[in-house]
Image: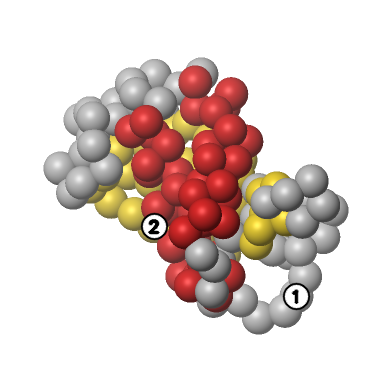
Amino acid sequence: MAHLVIAPLRVQQTKIKKFTLNLNTYRNSCFHVLNKAKVNYKSDIASQVSQLPSFTKVALTYKLFPQSKRRTDLGNVIAIHQKFFEDALVELGKIPDDDYKHVVKITQLFGKVDKDNPRIEISIEEIL
């Protein structure tokens, strides 16, 4: 059985400014901004993750639903989600670690353009 978590493409950075979750923004930001983005990302998805069971081994699928038709590099966007999400799974006690013994498969997919609800859908399947 697969479990689904919906993650935003941007998280709050300050009261006014949002942090776009992609490698370009990530590489150009200082560690204070990155830490705040990671904390806010975990906060945004915590209620969904807390409803998940605990897993030993998982396969994760990240599916991107961008806001526009602009060509997008999947890896650019999903890399940050992968790092933040897997760290959140560990920190929230859903997997023991995010190493290759516990996260055994990662898939990146393009969904479709969704101008009203841009997001990343993260599917979690337990591997027995």
Q: What residue sits right under mark 2 in the picture?
A: 107
Residue 126 seen: no
Which residue is rendered at x = 34% and y = 23% of the image? 93
Quarter of the image with the C terminus is top left
Q: What residue sits right under mark 1 in the picture?
A: 69
Which residue is rendered at x = 59% and y = 24% of the image? 47
Which is more toward the observer, 89 or 126? 89
Which is more toward the observer, 68 or 83? 83
Quick check: marks 2 and 1 in contact, CB under 8 Å? no
Disc 1 crowd rating (10 Å Cα; few below 14, some 14-19, many 20+) is: few
Quarter of the image with the N terminus is top left
Residue 83 position, x and y percent, is: 40, 52
Residue 92 position, x and y percent, is: 40, 26
Above or below, comparing residue 41 to residue 19 in the picture: above
Q: Quadrant of residue 106?
A: bottom left
Which is more toward the observer, 12 or 60? 12
Residue 41 position, x and y percent, is: 57, 43
Q: Quadrant of residue 58?
A: top left
Above or below, comparing residue 22 to residue 88 in the picture: below
Quick check: 95 left or right of 3? left
| Res. 44 mark | none
Residue type (three-letter) at the residue carrying disc 2: Thr
> Which secondary structure, mark 1?
loop
> Which secondary structure, mark 2?
strand
Q: Quadrant of residue 127?
A: top left
Residue 42 seen: yes
Residue 112 position, x and y percent, is: 68, 62
Quick check: 78 left or right of 115? left
Above or below, comparing residue 52 to residue 21 in the picture: above
Residue type (three-letter) at the residue carrying disc 1: Lys
Which residue is rendered at x = 42% and y = 53% of the image? 82
Above or below, comparing residue 9 to residue 101 in the picture: below
